[in-house]
Image (tube, rainbow, N blue to C red):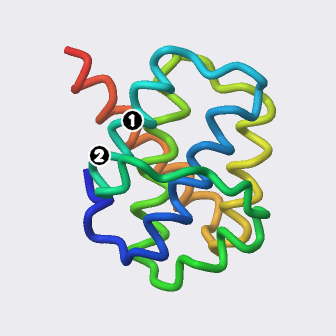
Amino acid sequence: MFLAELHQEEKEAFLELAHMIATIDGNVSIYEFSILNKYKNETGLEDYQVKGLAMEDILNKFKTERARNIVLAELFKLIYSDGVFQNEESETVNLIKAHFGFNSSEFGSFKDWVGKIKELSNS
């Protein structure tokens, strides 16, 4: 939805992070696969090959609050795509939340908002 707004380095970092989230449980669902392809198209990086960067290196690429909000919104979209919020996904999202400096209430509101957007898009 907003990935085109990211800078080139952020787009690549986002694709790394999205791939990490999609594969964290050892299984990429058809829904996750579809969203990963949409992300590649939206970023204009259709041929991007994941490099397997470290989480810290990836997260340090997102400098602005707007970029961090975009990342979190799109990651929740990916996580909710298969209808299952795995423990591993939750742990990773909590690491991202802490790194980006989101407080719990702000984060909870954001998570709820993304869930509602997903419900609307499925209607």
Q: What type is the residue that disc 1 sits on?
A: Asn
Say which residue appears at 45% left-offset and 19% top-offset.
31
Closer to the camera, 53 or 21? 53
Residue highlighted by disc 2: 41
Locate the C terminus and report the quarter of the image it occupies.
top left
Residue 39 to residue 95: above or below: above
Instruction: Please give left or right for residue 8 compared with residue 93 in the image.
Output: left
Mark 2, other Cα within 10 Å: few <14 / some 14–19 / many ≥20? some
Q: Position of residue 54 (x, y in %)?
A: 79, 63
- Residue 18 versus residue 83 in the image, above or below: below
Please tell me the numbered disc located at residue 63: none
**Distance of label 2 from label 1 (alpha carbons):** 6 Å
Q: Secondary structure at mark 2?
A: helix
- Looking at the picture, how far across and down is residue 44, in whole percent? 29, 57
Q: Position of residue 57 (x, y in %)?
A: 73, 74
Count residues near mark 1 (Cα–Cα under 10 Å), then give few for <14, some for 14-19, many for 20+.
some
Pick the front one: 45 or 16? 45
Residue type indicated by callout 2: Asn
At 66% from the left edge and 68% from the top edge, which residue is drawn?
58
Splitting the image into 4 quarters, where does residue 84 fall? top right
Q: Are marks 2 and 1 in contact (CB under 8 Å)?
A: yes
Give the side of residue 55 with respect to residue 64, left or right: right
Q: Which mark is residue 37?
A: 1
Give the residue displayed 75% in from the left and 34% down from the top.
Answer: 24
* In this view, 7 is above or below 54: below
Residue at the extreme bottom: 63
Circle count: 2
Q: Residue 102, how many percent across, how many down?
A: 60, 68
Residue at point 51% right, 46% down? 75
SS at badge 1? helix
